[in-house]
Image (cartoon, rainbow, N blue to C red):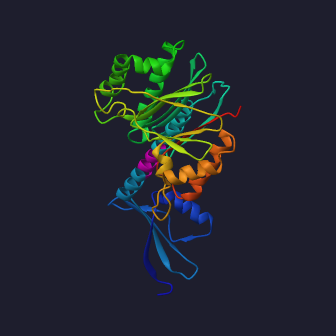
Amino acid sequence: MIGQPTEIVFLTDDVHAKFKEWRECGVRFHRAPQSDPWGAVSATFEDIDGNSFTLLSLQEVTSEIEAERLAHARHREAELRAAQELELARQVQSRLFPQIYPMTNTLEYAGTCIQARHVGGDYYDFLDLGRDRLGLVVADVAGKGTAAALLMANLQAHLHNQVSTYWNRPYLPMVLAQPERFRQTIKKLFHRNTADEAYATVFFAEYDDKAARLRYANCGHLAALLLRPDGGVESLDSTCTAVGLFKDFNCVAAERNLFPGDTLALYTDGVTEAFNEAGEEFGQDRLVETLCGYRHLSSHALLGHVVEEIRRFGPQEQHDDITLVVARCKQT
């Protein structure tokens, strides 16, 4: 069929513009574009062997192409706007984590939160409670994404409001000695402002810097780990239910004395439930082993090594927020 019509058609949304562009490049057209009664615009051209082709535009096709382009542009613009908003949300949420570490004489501590998405529901904090007392908080809001992040921000604001209101008093004693007041504020936070299924597990701890004593309330959270210098490991288990899970919230405290060389670890399930390609979880045993293996390091260095071990164990995509706080009682 050399030198004959090929019946091959090139569709374009603007025959006149394409005709001008191709002709300037040396394409041999039989004639200028012409309009047909049924709404088409066409022009025929040949290749170097004399084979002829048709350059064609149809109003229906042109309209469809333009609609596709506009839809794609709108979709792309929406994606960019959503990405910008998520990045802004990430930056805002990052400011909710501790920016200043209160000074202590007998305890060194560090914390981190590595989020699986732009924003998440994990939270940790270090609070200056006054009278040589440090507040340590780790929380995990149920759910993921923006909804969990908003509730996390509410929880953070609630705790900071409590601290600012009772700054000259011990913090946890206020929570525990006045449970009705605390219950009412929690009820307002979770039951009035959120869905019924919204709740958070929270580990509150008040550290007395002078007495080296830890008073804590574990509200349905994972057990904190207290590693003693002799190799013993103590679990600081739940003392009450998760915050917001039930309308009746009875906050109970427990206490531990800390001694030089003791290491305290608070964490969320993103640490122990990180899994490898075989589906095995990192687990509490590996966490304890890692903490013991690097316990001689500073809190910041210990924290870095634990995170490194978790990432080495499960190098694939992170599925949950990883939040960890470690504190070491200083040697005298």
Q: Is residue 258 magenta?
A: no
Residue at the front extreme of this rendering: 230
Q: Position of residue 34 (x, y in %)?
A: 43, 62
Q: Is residue 24 above or below residue 174?
A: below
Stretch in magenta:
69-77
Q: Answer yes or no: is residue 284 visible.
A: yes
Give residue 106's quadrant in the image. Answer: top right
Report the residue at 44% width, 80% height from top.
Answer: 5
Magenta stretch: residue 72 in it? yes
Is 116 left, or right, of 293 in this rendering? left
Query: What is the magenta segment's predominant secondary structure?
Result: helix
Q: Nearer the viewer, residue 73 or 246?
A: 246
Task: Report the side of 157 relative to 299 (left or right).
Answer: left
Residue extending farthest to the bottom is 1
Residue lying at 28% horizontally and 27% vertically, measured from the top left: 247
Q: Nearer the viewer, residue 319 or 331?
A: 331
Of residues 134 and 34, the one drawn nearer to the viewer in this rendering = 134
From the image, which quarter does the C terminus lie in?
Answer: top right
Q: Position of residue 60 (x, y in %)?
A: 34, 57
Query: Residue 192, position in %: x, y?
Result: 30, 24
Judging depth in this view, the residue of 218 and 319 nearest the camera is 218
Provide residue 44's location: percent of width, then percent of height: 47, 70
Q: How many marks?
A: 0
Residue 307 appears in the picture as rendered: no
